[in-house]
Image (tube, grey):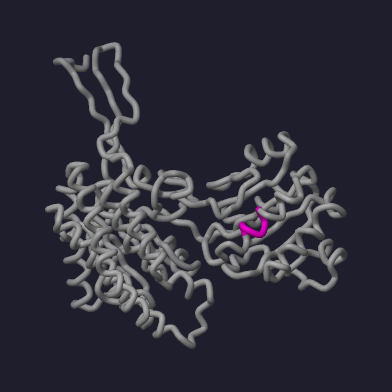
């Protein structure tokens, strides 16, 4: 069905009702005890494991529906659930329960000369709208994270994952009920009509405080273009790895293959490899060979083609493409200055890595590259809240306002000032 900015009365009523219920649930959640939230989270994990067979059965139906479609293998992988991923989903929820509760945490405190005592403390954002595609596990991750941070959440999954997401959502609601928390604290939009997305982007009459999109470039672009509420988003993950002449070649080979091939369909997968021009004779060929052996298609710049004339030439479009597949673009650059210039031109400011032993090169990379996540001698696939020790994440934000990088429980809070006096009046 084509997008529209005009809702039918039925969809309008449905979405506004969801918004009202979420806003009503958000208030008691804002001061719910840590014990109650953790009890709900553990009950959710238990319910997911207890209902594994049903969840996998519903997932099989979703997978059957996309059979024969032109969906990329990486997107099918995102959609697929199995025993291991179900167990990881439950484990992830329990890990969130084990995190410190951010609500009420005092971030800063100071005293004024007039005796006023001022503190800045974390408070929930309110109602979060999460719009996602393909990955049914986002239902569990987003629902659990928002709950831990004291927020209500409205989830809108893609049509391709609707059965799997519904089965998981039922388990989350069971957990809320078991802990005596409002069951509308985590809602899943029950329709696949894309007009429902438009309603969320307009804020559901003020019910939604922030939108988080998780999906492809077209979804995120639409959200950033149409949203009338704040957005935590990244448009795409155009991640780069720069291999300096000072890099240990064996380390570089391992990191580059892992960054590209571990999971090609995630936003932290490397899409462009930059090699120092001073290392053409020592580093370029071994890196090309190890990528080819791993099954990766290489698209090279003119200089790369001189070394390996059999590979596919890279076009201008390749430097701006998030492949999400076993494809990588490779260019030779003029040292760290050339690498920084290339990244500044083409990066989406998500994640970049430098492989080098020269501390001056690393320092320049960390100082001059302005992306949300920068790594030294490590794979870009570590761009993940769980790997940062933050528990599950709701996404990687590449903007510069409020949240940047992995969006975990702390980033799902705002703050308020609490001022304590003893009768002071302002002269």
Front-lying residue, 263 or 221: 263
Q: Quadrant of residue 416?
A: top left
Q: Is residue 262 left or right of residue 393?
A: right
Res. 341 in view:
no
Q: Is residue 323 above or below residue 390?
A: below
Residue lying furthest bottom in this view? 68
Front-lying residue, 24 or 299: 299
Front-lying residue, 90 or 143: 90
> Which residue occupies 68% across, 39% down?
362
Q: Is residue 107 left or right of residue 339?
A: left
Q: Is residue 194 above or below residue 39?
A: below
Q: Quadrant of residue 366?
A: top right
Instruction: Check residue 306 for magenta coloring.
Output: no
> Which residue occupies 43% across, 60% down?
224
How many numbered circles does the render carry?
Answer: 0
Instruction: Check residue 257 for magenta coloring.
Output: yes
The percent coordinates of residue 101 (x first, y second) are: 28, 40
Q: Is residue 417 above or below residue 273?
A: above
Magenta stretch? 255-259
Quadrant containing the N terminus is bottom left
Q: Is residue 83 left or right of residue 322?
A: left
The percent coordinates of residue 111 (x first, y second) are: 30, 16
The percent coordinates of residue 116 (x first, y second) are: 24, 17
């Amino acid at each position: 069905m084509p997008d529209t900015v005009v809702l039918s009365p039925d969809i309008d009523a449905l979405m506004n009702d969801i918004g009202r219920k979420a806003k009503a649930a958000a208030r008691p959640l804002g001061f719910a005890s840590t014990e109650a939230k953790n009890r709900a989270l553990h009950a959710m994990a238990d319910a997911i494991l207890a209902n594994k067979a049903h969840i996998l059965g519903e997932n099989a139906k979703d997978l059957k529906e996309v059979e024969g479609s032109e969906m990329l293998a990486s997107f099918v992988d995102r959609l697929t659930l199995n025993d291991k991923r179900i167990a990881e989903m439950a484990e992830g929820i329990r890990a969130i329960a084990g995190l410190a509760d951010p609500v009420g945490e005092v971030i800063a405190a100071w005293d004024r000369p007039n005796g006023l005592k001022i503190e800045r403390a974390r408070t929930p954002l309110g109602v979060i709208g999460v719009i996602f595609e393909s990955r049914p596990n986002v239902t569990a991750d987003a629902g659990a994270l928002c709950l831990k941070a004291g927020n209500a959440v409205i989830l809108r999954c893609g049509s391709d994952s609707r059965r799997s997401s519904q089965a998981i959502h039922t388990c989350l609601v069971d957990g809320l009920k078991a802990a005596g928390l409002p069951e509308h604290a985590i809602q899943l939009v029950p329709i696949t009509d894309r007009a429902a997305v438009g309603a969320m982007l307009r804020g559901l009459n003020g019910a939604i405080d922030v939108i988080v999109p998780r999906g492809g470039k077209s979804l995120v672009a639409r959200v950033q273009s149409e949203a009338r509420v704040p957005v935590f988003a990244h448009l795409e993950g155009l991640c780069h790895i720069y291999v300096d002449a000072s890099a240990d070649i064996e380390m570089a080979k391992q990191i580059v293959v892992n960054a590209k091939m571990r999971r090609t369909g995630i936003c932290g997968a490397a899409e462009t490899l930059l090699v120092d021009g001073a290392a053409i004779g020592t580093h370029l060929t071994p890196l090309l060979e190890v990528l080819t052996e791993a099954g990766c298609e290489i698209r090279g710049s003119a200089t790369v083609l001189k070394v390996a004339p059999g590979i596919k030439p890279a076009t201008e479009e390749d430097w701006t493409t998030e492949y999400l597949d076993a494809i990588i673009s490779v260019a030779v650059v003029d040292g760290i200055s050339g690498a920084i210039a290339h990244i500044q031109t083409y990066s989406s400011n998500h994640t970049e890595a430098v492989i080098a032993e020269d501390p001056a090169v690393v320092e320049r990379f960390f100082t001059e590259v302005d992306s949300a996540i920068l790594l030294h001698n490590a794979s870009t696939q570590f761009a993940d809240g769980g790997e940062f020790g933050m528990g599950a994440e709701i996404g990687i934000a590449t903007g510069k306002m409020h949240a940047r990088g992995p969006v975990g429980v702390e980033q799902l809070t705002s703050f308020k000032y609490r001022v304590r006096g003893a009768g002071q009046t302002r002269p």
